Image: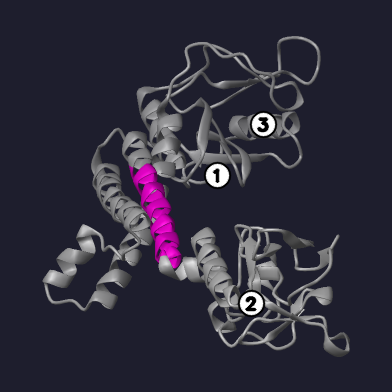
Amino acid sequence: MNRIVAIILAIVLSVASATAGIRHYCDYQGNVRQVADAQGNVIEQNDYYPYGGLFGESASHQSYKYSGKELERMNGLNTYDFHARPYYYPAIIFHSPDILSEKTPWLSPYLYCAGNPIMLIDPTGMESWWSQMWDDYNMTTRLYGAMKAASGITEAVVGATAGVATSWTGVGAVLGGAALVHGCDVAASGISQMISGEETSSLTSQGLQAAGVPKETAERIDVGLSIGFTFVSGIASNVGSITTKATSTSTTTTAVGETGAVSKTGGRLGSQATRAQNSQIAQKLGDRGYIITGGGGLKSEEYLAPLSPGRKGGSYIDISAEHPRYGVLRINTVDVLKDGVTPTARELRNATRIREQIKPNGHLLLIPKTK
């Protein structure tokens, strides 16, 4: 595009100067590089710095130089006449602001060629051909299309993740599937808009418009659906992942814990009623974001080694769980007195020993056993 314009300018300049018996030879930007007389002899050679400054200039026989514009040197002006405003090349700025600068508010209104005189030209002094090409090729619309495509792809990925995390069952299947389908719809419309340069509505928005919803409102609803599906599907994905971890089993584990605590195979699960109670508690913890690391009918119980040498004084924990925010929680279901709340003396002794075996900031919760 720039080369075509430069060639046109060169042709116009050559025709205009033909009556004077000289010819101008221009480069791809329309800069006058050589001037020849009627016999074809080169009588002027011009070389330029990127912003129009001359160097290595031979004898000057005419005033048209950089970008094919007239150079005014009278009284030391050293400015090029760019029609709309003069360009002062020693300072690489225009003397006055661009009257079309509102099209490119991120650029200085005095800047020449958007600061890139190698790739761009400014044939009229009103705007560089970069901004014109930006408008000609609907680059803003294409940019919005790319953003829409990225948003749709993100929504689809989050939806698919939610479905996989919940094994495509229950709420995860509904929300994940909806997000996946809607995300693909939005991504397809965004890609189409990015390629064509024309505003393209998703099928969801088109359906709303067909139902009588104004286009602007339909587009806003479409954006709201994208945000909502992405957010809710993300929550479903996290819940599904936590539940999967909480319900996974491990046949053999041996890991060093706090103050020498280790997990061992075996344990003391108690009666059937106690096992059922522990399982229910573990399930509730999993629903609240905890990861079961021991007991609860899911894994072997955590074993706390004695504080003194020997085998006596060790402790088993009915349920051990970890939370990314609240740390480690240990739970024991205990026998209580007739009031249904106070632990028996034996359970109190065990709790006291466990408190000594875990760190001071460790949490121990005693829950009465169900009858």
Question: Residue 146: within the magenta?
Answer: yes
150 magenta-colored:
yes
Residue at the spot x=84%, y=63% of the render? 58
| Amino acid type for the residue under numbered disc 3 | Arg
How many neighbours does mark 1 have within 10 angstroms: few (below 14), some (14-19), or many (20 or more)?
some
In the image, which residues are magenta?
A: 137-159
| Residue bearing mark 3 | 349
The tag on residue 20 is: 2
Q: Nearer the viewer, residue 5 or 306?
A: 5
Camera-side mark, 1 or 2: 2
> Which disc is residue 342 wearing?
1
- Measured as percent of width and height from the top left, residue 249 is found at 44, 20
Do labels 3 and 2 touch, CB within 8 Å? no
User: Does residue 49 lie above or below 322 as drawn?
Assistant: below
**Can you give x and y, in whole percent of width and height, for residue 181 in the image?**
25, 48
Give the structural element (helix, strand or loop) at label 2: loop
Sooner in the amino-acid sequence: mark 1 or mark 3 = 1
Q: Is residue 350 left or right of residue 149?
A: right
Mark 1 and mark 2: Cα distance apart in space? 115 Å
- Dividing the picture into quarters, in which one does residue 315 lie? top right
